[in-house]
Amino acid sequence: MAAGCVIGVDLGGTKLLAGVVDSGLNVRHRAYRHARESGSTEALIALLVEAVEQARDAAGEEIRAVGFGIPSLVDAATGVAGTTVHLPLQDVPFRDLMAERLGVPVAVDNDANAAMVAEHRHGAARGARTAALLTLGTGIGGALLVDGRLVHGASGAAGEWGHMVVDLDGAPCHGSCPNRGCLETVVSGTALGKAGRRAAEDRPESGLGRALASGREITGALVTELAHDGDEVARDVLAAMGRHLGVGLANVVNILNPEVVVVGGGVLAAGDLLLEPARRTVAERALAPSRDQVRIVPTRFGDASGMIGAALLAMDLADGVSERAA
């Protein structure tokens, strides 16, 4: 790995993070933006360029390449962003467009794939040959590792764990997903906020109920905060979500037989309040021997996994590494 810095960008359904990363994976500078502020493709591209330029200016040195992890189905050969559920990126020649705007080499992959690169090379999945990753944020991102390599699928759509159906007659899914009863309708930051509001309405004496009565917006972050503060109703909401997550993970374990399942994203601020019910559900529902062998662990890099992974993709590009394990 040559010396010098790259920029890694993690674009989610709600926010984006750009970071200047050196060859030792030290993050020197960060730039944050709210992705939902951009209502059109052009506005979103402009927001990305602005964040990268801010990070580049702060670095004060030449940037070798920029890597992007985006919540889209990405054609690995062409760098085209196909379907994107939560943002206005549909059939956009993302890699070439950003390279033209930024004037540096650009690498791009799905955001969860980028997170898997970081966690497999240097994090919670290090050394694994078979692994799955789920990022719990606005929706659910997913990645799949087999024989030490990322699996993209025929059109870049492999690992969409969030869109496995866990309730045949469940709620309609989010964004452009045509399905209903998908895992992300019951396990995501969006779902946590909705479940928290229902609990607040049903239990007005609870911390959640008092927060609602005082005019606060019931978000997933607030549910998590109150749960950590000891509110039993908020803890019950997280435990129920953890059980739903466990059902999804049991499916992943049965299908893939992974050594490790890594779970990350903003919702993981809940920690074991979410993961312990999920682990118990997997132990109850998944088949042996897979259930007995798999480790279900949080990401090492937390919310920065996608950004670090995107930076590693940029380093590969700058170093001329075209064929690599994750």
Image: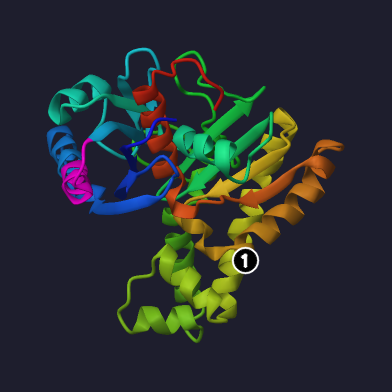
- Please tell me which residue lies in front, 119 or 222: 119
Q: From the top left corner, tell me how far across and down residue 70 is, in percent.
A: 35, 35
Q: From the top left corner, tell me how far across and down residue 224 is, in percent.
A: 49, 69
SS type, badge 1: helix
For the stretch drawn in magenta, the main secondary structure is helix
Q: Quadrant of residue 3?
A: top left
**Residue furthest right as drawn:** 289
Q: Which residues are magenta?
A: 51-62
Residue type at tag 1 = Leu
Q: Is residue 312 visible?
A: yes
- Please tell me which residue is depicted at 38% across the width and 12% down the height of the picture: 77
Was residue 191 drawn as part of the magenta stretch in this picture? no
Q: From the top left corner, tell me how far across and down residue 62 is, in percent.
A: 21, 36
Q: Quadrant of residue 280?
A: bottom right
Q: Is residue 277 left or right of residue 262?
A: right
Q: Is residue 181 above or below residue 298?
A: above
Q: Quadrant of the C terminus?
A: top right
Q: From the top left corner, tell me how far across and down residue 149 is, in percent.
A: 59, 23
Q: Is residue 159 above or below residue 53?
A: above
- Please tell me which residue is depicted at 56% across the width and 34% down the height of the picture: 164
- Please tell me which residue lies in front, 246 or 142: 142
Q: Is residue 301 left or right of residue 11?
A: right
Q: Which residue is mark 1?
A: 273
